[in-house]
Image (tube, rainbow, N blue to C red):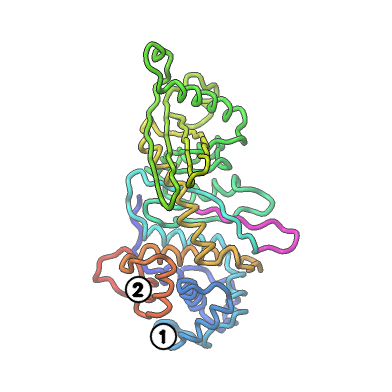
Amino acid sequence: MRTHPRRSLIEHLKQLPDPRVRGRCDHDLVDVLVIALCCLMCGGETFNDMEDFGHAKADWFKTFLRLRSGIPTHDTFNRVLAAIKPEAFLEVFMAWTQTLRQEVAKEIVALDGKALRRALERGDSPRVIVSAWAASQSLVLGQVEVPDKTNEITALPQLLRALELEGCIVTIDAMGCQKKIAQEIREADADYVLALKGNQTQCHAEIKSFLDDAVSRHGEKAPARRNRVPLAHTQTVEKDHGRLETRRYWQSGDLEWFGDREKWEGLASVGVVEAVRQVGQETPTVERRYYLSSLGVDVESFARAVRGHWSIENSLHWVLDVQCGEDRSRVRAGNAASNLATLRRMALNLLKQEKTKKRGIRGKQLNASWDHAYLLRLLNFRRVRPESRALC
């Protein structure tokens, strides 16, 4: 991973091009963005929240922002975020996240889309944001909005090309299980674990048949062992609040039978995960999911990649909806929905990376709203030597 300049978030935000007419703006762009970001870090959600938050903390903001014309109105927050080019904001966001990112061997990078369910006009389809999530670091590495009237497949290559993925394991759900996506990942010197479902009808049927048969033979004793496919196997058991979930993982590098193996760049193994879930005295449910992977046979790495992908739902998407109100947001003018989504992920990155408070996201939001020193520490967070404290 390349070394990136160690600059604070405010320094990165100052690099964002201002889309407004020069000389006709009452508020500096960085002032608008910093107030909006701090509001989100303290649990605010709307443009009205940002205006009220700014007035409540105006004296504090004046200690490090210019505020030439005081606190922006809610309409100003809306107009500015609607005007900013999402591509430029994404570039700034990703440059900043690279300064937070740590080097992790075989880092799991999960890519998945999330709909902005209420940010739409009547008759329109919801906007979808595809995020890249570093599972072990709880860090959003980047995001991109899916173009209108298309699906995630069109956005995934753009995001993959923008990320630094060398040495990582990229995981994507069934929507991204495409030969072109596999090629993009391998060209980035990364490995992949791609979920396989009915969108790859023949491929799914062949691998399902092969792995189901291999798993059924896996526990057989000799002499039937002679016809048995070599499988690597592991399992995990989780028990919590009356729920018992057992996950069994099998992986095979035997691909001679698979006619399309050369069409999938770097394909080295196939795998299956069986999840057995029981709640109380209810009848257990059993589900199997199938995967294509460029990983060699290493079932522990395969299992870690699958579990890492699930974390994007639990640790990112769920938090964005429940703690940050993303599903409730009706912002939809211009680019405002996309840019506000980027700001939410900035806020979430800062909250998750700050470790001095042993609290969840909601607790940290409350602490930030009460304590100016803690809010300033969040805003100025960066992985640098302790003596480097400059904010701007």
Report helix, strand or loop for mark 1: helix
Magenta residue span: 119-132
Image coords of residue 121 (percent x, y): 72, 64
Q: Earlier in the sequence, mark 2 or mark 1?
A: 1
Q: Quadrant of residue 225 in the image? A: top left
Q: Is residue 334 magenta?
A: no
Q: Disc 1 marks which residue?
A: 60
**Residue pointed to by mark 2:** 377
Vertical placement of residue 120 versus 308, above or below? below
Mark 2 secondary-structure assignment: helix
Q: Residue shown at 38%/80% (left/top)?
A: 372
Q: Position of residue 304 (x, y in %)?
A: 39, 42
Residue 267 x/y as whole percent: 46, 30
x and y percentages locating residue 360 in the rendered image: 40, 65
CA neighbours of label 1 inside 10 A, class few (<14), some (14 to 19), many (20+): few
Q: Nearer the viewer, residue 335 or 220?
A: 220
Structural distance between the alpha carbons of marks 2 and 1: 14 Å
The reply to whether callout 2 and callout 1 are in contact (CB within 8 Å) is no
Above or below: residue 41 compared with residue 128 = below
Is residue 354 visible in the rendered structure shown here? yes
